[in-house]
Image (cartoon, coloured by chain):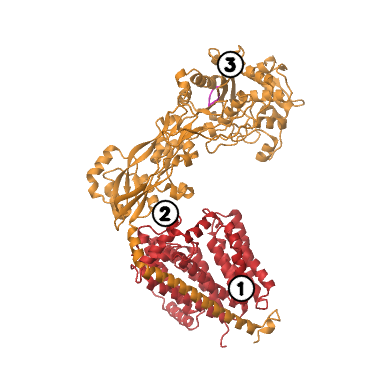
Chain colours: A orange, B red
Amino acid sequence: MTWRGRDRNAVKDLAQEAGLFRVRAAEGFLIIAICLAVLLARYAWLQVLRHDEFSGRADENRIKLKPLPPSRGLIYDRNGVLLAENILDYRLELIPEQVGDIDEALQRLGKVIAISADDRDQFEALRKVKRRFHNIPLRYALSEQEVSRFALERHRFPGVEVVPYLTRFYPHGSDFAHVIGYVARIDSDDRERLEEARYSATTHIGKTGIERYYEDLLLGDVGYERIETNAEGRALRVLGRVPSKPGQHLRLSIDANLQRATVAAFAGRTGAAVAIDPRNGEVLAMVSQPAFDPNLFVNGISRRDYAALLNAVQRPLYNRAVLGGYEPGSTIKPFIGLMGLRLGLRTPETTIWSSGEFHLPGQSAVWRDWKRGGHGSVNLREALAQSVNTYFYGLAVDTGIDRMEPEMRAFGFGAPTGLDLTGEPFGVVPSRSWKQKRFGKTWYPGETVIAGIGQGYWVVTPVQLAHALATLAARGVSHPPHLLLSLQAGIDAQPQPVPIAADGPPIVASPEMWDAIREGMEAVMHSPTGTARAFGIDAPYRIAGKSGTAQRARRRGNQEYNENTTPEHLRHQALFVAFAPTDAPTIAVAVVVEHGSSGSKAAAPVARAILDAYLLKPKSEMSP
Amino acid sequence: MIDFDLMARLEYRLAHWLKRPRVDLALLAALLAVAAAGLVVLFSASAEDPGQVVNQTLRLMLGFAVLFVFARIPPTVFRTWTPWFYAITVLLLAAVLVFGEGRGAHRWLDFKVVRFQPSEFAKLALPMMVAWYLHARALPPTWRNLAVCALLIGLPAGLIMDQPDLGTALLVLASGAFAVFLAGLGWGRIALIVGAAMATLPVLWQGMHEYQRNRVRMFLDPEADPLGNGWNIIQSQIAVGSGGVVGKGWLGSTQARLDFLPEHTTDFIFAVYSEEFGLIGVVAIIAAYLFIIGRGLWIAANARDTYSRLLAGSISMTFFVYVMVNGGMIAGLMPVVGVPMPLVSYGGTSAVSLLAGFGILMSIHAHRLRGR
């Protein structure tokens, strides 16, 4: 025992410790041996005494549970027009265990039914996650010809079956592409996040739009069939079933007729339009042009078709109405005007002199009116009617950017509106802190000037603009925009209204102030000086509107805008906002036409067409 | 061209190594036998998927490589680095709670290049730390020592429990408790501590996740929900029971084939084994496990210092917990807890950490006191 002295702890008795350990180890081993003996006894009990019973139950296990897919909920417009339905189709399925040599079988099968490389890839991916005796889909949406051709050759393909299934169909094609979105085959990314059991019989999942946002409601609950199988697992007969529960039917606030009229009003031009009922925030139409046919995606879009959509210059897959960021331009002026009244900086009667040029004290920079020589003496009404920049330059400077920001945010600019579609961006309300965060630079007074006419750092989406306008039309009551109106458990079930997000904080102003803004916007359409009088003059109802012309907001840093160096496709976004009828507004619409010549010329007629389609429709269609 | 010179040198090295091996050949043989049995049953359980068998073989080879490397490192080196290793493990466990990812539970740390579960580290770090602490103290431990040990054990075990990973938390807790037990804790005190632990069970129940509670409820009455949570328990017992004395033979498991048995390559692989090889196979493999544990304790008893003794003993006894919890779960003796059957269940990290532990055992064996 030469060890003792080397240890730090003098009281340690190493020999005694080693002895103690041996006792403990022996005791431990004894306990372990006893425990394992108990474990063995349990196995002996299961495997000897209860062997017959469990053998019987193992045989009974030939009864398998086959999952039954739920049928996906249907989607209707507000008047009951079907927008997404399920139709019967046929697909080809393989059971690898029964097929044997899969490569060889696919080779032969390819001569009967066309199988693309895409189909092969999808099939191989599924083969990796499914078990050998499960059905794996190979081709979807077989034509009648293909089904009958396979029926003749069927005996040559054991383990290959033609199976009927319900597939999604969008009867209106591209008209609702950006609202409804589409479903497509579940891919490996989806598989990562979905609940395996709920999708055990389901092959498709909502990828975009309403189909994605309300996937949980639309999906339904999987059912089971108890099937007796032989030893190889082949079905012999059905013993019982728990039917699947179909998904909820959705009724949207969209008006199909208005939606189609909106698409038609664009007449092939690129842009977006959103129409909202200012009384409740219901989205009546939402269009992004150009669009695409969502039916292409349902049963697997070919690589070529997909590449064509993805690479098209006009970006048809891009939902401009929700995602597109634009400079609001002069459409911001009614909001700036109201800000001046609310802060007590202006009264409706205050007049300012427009000389055509605006200066900041002590600076040489010039900001201009659109009309050479200016508009002369104008009050708020005329400033809106003629879109007098100088009025709003001065007002913005008097307000200051720090007071302007919260006033604009109150209308919902600079934040997602809460619309029930994924991916809504924030947009930008110009502010010192935003610029500091984004560019690390301080604010220049000149940037306040152009912020007053909706230029500079401003970024708004068509949905934000429509929502802000609806709030203005509702005299400050802010209803969050939404697409889902009600749910139905089945065709005959009573519609269940869905809970709607609480109203935002109201914007308080006196009736005189609201009237002043409304009158100014009415003058845009109906007075001899209004910038859009050509599109208001013959209207059988009163419209409040405002045009805007701006570049697409994509500028970096604080570089000055130079029309000559800006690429064609980045300038001249034509905007128009309008609500009607002015005495009791039932619709507020925001329109963007990309590459339009100007807001009053390119976007105003689209807005007018939308208002006409909604307000002048025959009475029979009015009530749902 | 064959390099005869090289061949001769290799032959010489092999002969030399066999004469004075740094590893305990009996223990190594038992580990290899169990691992081989695992691969055989994995081929059947995976529906004859060679990919999984190759994967598992590679992992086991990595594990045995780690074992041989660890066997060459003297226990004093392990002891020196123990507090650092422990501290890093606790930090990583804390990091997992903050940055971790994984389905449902946060167990993984993703370093872009490597992804791993720090809780696997804890399986070694914890018994090492307790052994390190007790090494410098007079034994048997005082209440004060016990309180420190409880802290050392409770911190990582709590963090793992929070992930939540009940199975690993249990293993880590047991490895620490065994070190304390082997240090000579009196039976009176053990009774007191176990009693106190029993008293806190209701508190533990409150702290458990709903799925964990469901597993315990199902264990108590599996037939209540035969298609839901009780499914695993019933089906694995059917697999075991239908195997009988001699089993259905290799590749003969219908329970796994027809997809009735869940997780039949990982946590429930022993059910497939029992179904195919019957009671005879079960007795054989349990005997092998008991031999590994006994041999490990024998190595521990002959170790040269307290640290080595406690560590080797704790690693051996923890191995028993794997067998008991997994085997008990499959036979319906214990609730469903995510503990693998050691060296048999498919899955890499636990096999590597287990074999690393046995590497330390081998090192302790190689550095034992000789000629006493």
Disc 2 designates what residue?
A: B227
Secondary element under disc 3, as helix, strand or loop, is: helix
- Residue A191 placement (x, y as % from top left): 45, 49
Rendered image quadrant of residue B112: bottom right
Main SS of the magenta part reads strand
Mark 3, Cα crowd under 10 Å, few <14 / some 14-19 / many 20+, is many
Assign the C terminus of chain B to one quadrant of the image. Answer: bottom right
Q: Nearer the viewer, residue B58 or A39?
A: A39
Disc 3 designates what residue?
A: A525
Mark 1, Cα crowd under 10 Å, few <14 / some 14-19 / many 20+, is few
Residue type, numbered disc 1? Ile
Q: CA distance from mark 2 to mark 3?
A: 68 Å
Disc 1 designates what residue?
A: B190
Q: Is residue A313 visible?
A: no
Residue type, numbered disc 2? Leu
- Residue B179 placement (x, y as % from top left): 59, 73
